[in-house]
Amino acid sequence: MTVDHSFRPTGSTFSREDPLTLQHAYGNYVAHRINPLTPLELYIHVPFCLRRCGYCDFNTYTATDLGHGASRSQFAHMIEQEIHLLDDWQEQHGIPRRPISTIFFGGGTPTLLPAEDLVHILTCIRRTWGILPHAEITTEANPDTVNERSIETLANGGFTRISFGMQSAVPRILNILDRTHDQQNVIRGVRAAQENGLRTSIDLIYGTPTETMEEWKQSLTAAVDLHTTHISCYALTVAPHTKMGRIIRDHRIPPVNDDDEAEKYEFADQFLTNHQFTWYEISNWSIHGEESQHNLGYWKNVDWFGLGPGAHAHLTTTHIHDELHPRIWADKLNAHLLPWVEPEYLTAEENLEETILLGIRLREGLPLSQIIPSLTSTQTNHLTHEIHQLEHDQLLTLTHQHLIPTLKGRLLNDLIINRLLESITPQNNHTT
Amino acid sequence: MQKNVSGETPQSVIRNFCIIAHIDHGKSTVADRILQLSGVVASRDMKNQYLDKMDIERERGITIKAQAVRVPWTVDGVEYTLGMIDTPGHVDFSYEVSRSLAACEGAVLLVDATQGIEAQTLSNLYMALDHDLTIIPVLNKIDLPSADPDTYGKEIADLLGIDESDVLRVSGKTGEGIADLLDTIVRLVPPPHGDETAPARALIFDSEYDAYRGIITYIRMVDGVINSRERIRQMGLGTSHDPIEIGVISPSMIPTDRLTAGEVGYVITGVKDVNQSKVGDTITTQNQGAETPLPGYKEPQPMVYSGLFPIDTTEFPNLRDALDKLKLNDASLIYTPETSTALGFGFRCGFLGLLHMQIILERLKREFQLDLISTAPNVHYRVITEDRQEHIVTNPSEYPEGRLLAVYEPMAAVDIILPKDFIGDTMTLCQEHRGQMITMEYISANRVDLHYRIPLGEIVFDFFDQLKSRTKGYATLDYHEDGEQESDLVKVDILIQGEQVDAFSAIVHKDKAYAYGVMMTKKLRTLIPRQQFEIPLQAAIGAKIIARETISALRKDVLAKCYGGDITRKRKLLEKQKEGKKRMKLLGRVQVPQEAFIAALSTGDVNDKDTKDKIRSAEHKARFS
């Protein structure tokens, strides 16, 4: 693999203690590499929740006011400041302004903020950078925190899509997941969204300990019955340090089982296919043409900005993210500093790894044209050999020069990634 | 007052003695106090365990290499020269112990006043009695609140058939009683009685490698004189050398012009290979040398074998260099290159015993930074095949195929000393390991000496760990070779995906083959991670499968969510997995973690129901097929 030996700023030269130096170095680095034709997306992280779900491992807080301006009521104002600082930074370093291609409000629970605040942020973005016509603008919503009026406000303010965290239609399972909402609220919310011309998406979780296949089927049926056009199904993943992790460790509920999740995944894929949904990414199914453009951007490795505590940004071959804790985040903004934590500059090798690990999740597949040019002819030979093996193992297909995982390959995606990467690691080229 | 000159000390004022003790009974501390009291080491230079040079020795509190120090001690105005020979405390080094004993006329039997007699103390004591040494019984650690000198003093007195008042009481820590001990040594230990005018004969009781000076050979002069300018000859090896230096140790090396009968000292010839200086051999002069060597010389024989393989196969040359270096200082270490289909290139090593093996492994890891897999230890078997050929098998993978006329396995005479409460459990353990009880003696009201004959192969596996756990650590064990016996042994192979993995093969008694097979396959099932295909694990005797487990195919490894910050995390996770994979061995298509090979080193407990059921059903099937 060719390695990028060009200059990269390192952590030792630009420490966290000197945010301005960091900001400038990062700006210079990005300015020299940015491709103005690459779409630029925007993610906004709203770190507030009414309560924390047992399995939740995200950067969220249940307090309404964390001090120093890190409060729900001040949040839109703080994001506005971040937008201005980011824009100034771009301008200082000669990074061309690009209109935003998609926007996603995630959390946490973005809908804990008044709908007017979310619209205000949107307006601010539009004024600063512009938003492409027909851009997809989504907010996540907890079914308990939206109503007909707030949904109407969002629609009028420019939102085009709402993603509902339904998780399950079975109260027993919702209870294990620590979710409080009522299925009736989901139905009401989705209907209101649809009446206001918004696209909808439903998030489901499968593999909750003790969940039966019948219960999983109930949830899938309920989601399809909502006439939504997009469904995401996520296997429950329990981090050991979460509340649910501790409950499992204490043997109060059984652990998550990979085989059970694999079966439920296969069932979901079959069920959704029977209901006119098609998978387009490992955990995402939609009616044709209703794929989430924002999410596809992540897996195609486009550029995106992140706003809000802990939000990540990818610009060319760099990663950077905001301070995790809302108060530290707010402190920096109040001091007119971008609330960044030290950037990561990817090597060519690391960038290739990301291209592979992201692209191989997609139904449209990983284009070989994104990998081959950076390989030596020996590496290409090894890769070609491995691709044949993977085809033989029925893990992927090679169609029109794209590597597309099979159903088995979607579940064993890590195996595919590992084998592809291993085939092109340099030391491999000596042995055979 | 007369002052003894090194190299010219008359035998009448020499007293050579050693200290025999169980590990942790404070031998080195007492030796330290003796050095201090006699003035050869100034108090300010004193560091604990002065004689134990190696780090591992100091850490483990055991003495691996014997050393010899000359200390002056005056009684009634006469200066005496004490030769204190530090003996290794462990059973693995019993040949070295016996050579050290052969270099002395007396032995201090040191017993911890809080613990009493232990198995090793006994075996070393018997060895000392065999050498007709004068025994001076001493209770140590009398300063400790938990010391019970009355009880243990009686134990010793009963054992030796002496009066309780003859058992000395000392504290190595405070120095109490040490002067009295030295006086007693002078009084009771007989002086050497070599023939001063006869041709020179000196016993090699130890040798060590020094990076700057080469091999240092420790000798005890028995007869005659060796001069520093005189060519010397090793009678057993038949080699001759000019000494570069001869001298005594007190406590550092002091060169002398000669060594005379009765003295303890050292010789340096510039030889670099410890094999050129074999413990037990006799040194004489080249001209007018002795004709008959001193008795008792033998080559140390390895008792335990294990394959050592570098985890990273490119480390093989480093492993060879490391073994070569250790060998310089340890003639008993034996190794030959070995190729394993599972583990690649390595060495089959022979050790004196389990502790010896552990020490070598530890040193390879610590001093040479080698990451190794060591296969389960085994003993050597004498196998007679149908064509009446005899094969010595030190590696299970070399066990002859086909019909065998007879198989002989080495036996061990085992002494176990333990509190009487644990007799039942310990007897069960010995029976499980095919032991035959010889005697049981009460050494005091509460403590028992069990004497068993057990196949050595049963002991080297995990006997000691189990003994410790079943007796809450109270039992002590000692064993020595005790001939061989014909046994009904079979080789059990382990197959992963139908491929035999040589590193897991074991030679076990027929009655235990099923248990071994079931336990190994079960254990591997938990240790080998699931892979994209099903992995059958089988245990077999020849072509007959005796146990089977299956690792079902992995169905899902994907991360459900991969947005924003997940991407960096995911990449780092994959990089970590890649590192982890480097520590896996690829057997066929199956990735096997190192832990699997390490786990094969112990059978663990077999008390869960599933294991018992499986063993029973495997045995049942075998009976009716």
Image: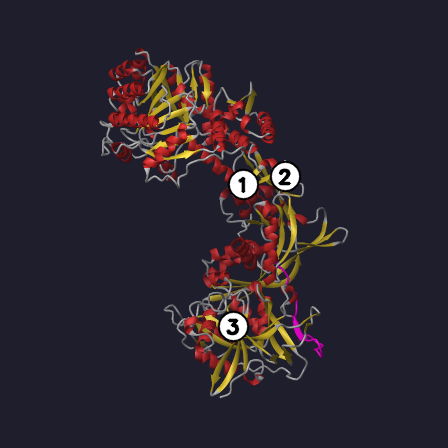
Farthest residue in the right direction? B387
Q: Quadrant of residue A152?
A: top left
Q: Are marks 2 and 3 on the same chain?
A: yes
Q: Is residue A270 above or below residue A306?
A: above
Give the x, y percent position of residue A312: 37, 30
Q: Quadrant of residue B545?
A: top right
Residue nearer the viewer, B27 or B621 = B27
Q: How far apart are marks 2 and 1 (CA)?
A: 22 Å
Q: Is residue A19 visible?
A: yes
Q: Distance between the residues labelled 3 and 1?
A: 48 Å
Amino acid of disc 3: Ser
N-term mark: 3 or 1: 3
Amino acid of disc 2: Glu
Circle 2/circle 3 CB separation < 8 Å: no
Span highlighted in magenta in the image = B281-307
The residue under label 2 is B499
